[in-house]
Amino acid sequence: MAGAIANSNLPRRIIKETQRLLTEPAEGISASPAEDNLRYFSVMILGPAQSPYEGGAFRLELFLPEEYPMAAPKVRFLTKIYHPNIDKLGRICLDILKDKWSPALQIRTVLLSIQALLSAPNPEDPLDENIAKHWKTDQGGAIATAREWTQLYATSN
């Protein structure tokens, strides 16, 4: 696979980032490019310890647009998740994926930020209003639902 990446006509930066993701994965995160499209990544993020998502393995997809790194990667959850900043379609409300994107950021930074968002949901900047309302009015109940969904959709047992 590494040979295919090096011989592709991808920008050098994407090649370097991809090789680093494969050789030095961040803890709890794996990302590998599709063989037929090296701009499309299959991602797995493990639910962080002490979060309602602990024990879950969440599948995401990440795509690097032609304009990358001047434009943010497109990322979405494929695994169903109960989180105020992630909607039913798996879209993620995260500032660095929108107006706070900078070409200095990398795929790795984005994935670490998404992992951090699982540890610290932000109902004040929601993508799913109903879940955010549940989180604000009954945090215990919302966390219980998040744990339940993690068991239902993000574990393989």
Image: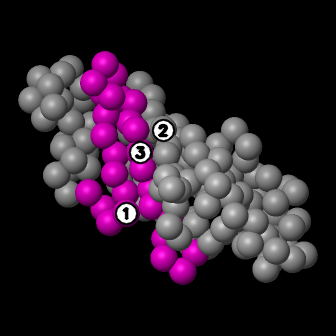
Residue type pointed to by label 2: Glu
- Mark 1 and mark 2 lie on one chain; the one further toward the N terminus is 1
Q: Quadrant of residue 18?
A: top left
Identity, as a three-letter code, of the amino acid under mark 1:
Gly
Magenta-drawn segment: 25-51
Tag shown at residue 103: none
Quadrant where the N terminus is found in the figure: top left
| Residue situated in front as seen by the camera: 82 or 76 | 82
Mark 1 → mark 3, Cα distance in angstroms: 11 Å
Disc sitting over residue 28 in the figure: 1
Identify the element where label 3 is drawn: strand
Q: Secondary structure at mark 2?
A: strand
Please tell me which residue is depicted at 27% across the width and 37% down the height of the picture. 14
| Magenta residue check for 132 | no
Closest to the observer, 90 or 97: 90
Q: Return the mark for residue 61.
A: 2
The residue lying at 87 percent from left, 57 percent from top is 130
- Residue 83 location (% of width, % of height): 70, 60
Q: Amino acid at mark 3?
A: Val
The numbered disc on residue 43 is 3
x then y, percent, for residue 72: 49, 41
Q: Mark 1: which secondary structure?
A: loop
